Amino acid sequence: MVWLASFQGMAQDSGPTDYRNFPVTLTLQFQSFSLPFKNLGANFKNMGIGIGTEVSHNGDHDWIQEFSLFWIRNKAMGNGLYLMTQTSWRPYLGNPVFGELKAGIGYKLAFRPSESFIQKNREWIAAGKKGKGMLAIPIGIGLGVHDYSESVYTSPFVNYQAIFLKGFNQDIPLVPETIFQFGTRTHFNELVK
């Protein structure tokens, strides 16, 4: 009977929480228009910054929905503003280190690096620096540290992402670019109570 009571108590225990929703995520991005895992050094010529947050799908650290907004400066190809959401799987590789696989969908607003022109009725007319929006499909891998604490804590991470842009030009259906992302998530305990 005592064994049954202890088993029932264990079945009702949900275990310790190891995650808090809505951390503030701050990132540095380094971007390149290149195929994944090719010419990795080119990424560090174009830098940007980002902010975001995330929500757990199951109350734990392992399945997360991320939301991010970031800007990247690229003098050669034009600056870009990204709005992304990605589903991330973060298994622990050894507490507190985790790996990360993620994929999602987003939108990139790309700006031209200089004045551009379009041909209309056999004349070239200035089109300005305004850019265009494109569907973005990000796929990424990463590593990080998630050392949970009851008080405010940070979780540093590094990610490498391939982003495929649809609508960059008419000849190529998907254009790849890559991003190195270094950042930290700050989990506040007062915001979720």
Image (tube, rainbow, N blue to C red):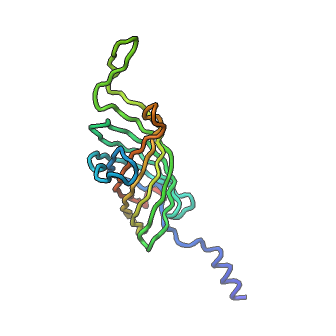
Q: Is residue 144 above or below residue 179?
A: below
Q: Residue furthest right?
A: 1
Q: Position of residue 181 (x, y in %)?
A: 36, 53
Residue at 65% x, 76% y is 11
Q: Is residue 157 above or below residue 104?
A: below
Q: Nearer the viewer, residue 188 or 83?
A: 83
Q: Residue furthest front?
A: 171
Q: Residue furthest top?
A: 121
| Relative side of 176 to 42, left or right | right
Q: Position of residue 112 (x, y in %)?
A: 33, 31
Residue at 26% x, 38% y is 75
Q: Position of residue 50 (x, y in %)?
A: 36, 47
Q: Nearer the viewer, residue 151 or 59?
A: 59
Q: Is residue 75 above or below residue 144?
A: above
| Relative side of 46 to 5, left or right | left
Residue at 42% x, 38% y is 108
Q: Nearer the viewer, residue 104 or 118?
A: 118
Instruction: Give the position of the N terminus as an image quadrant.
Output: bottom right
Instruction: Count how many numbered circles sit on residues in the image.
Output: 0
Q: Position of residue 182 (x, y in %)?
A: 34, 56
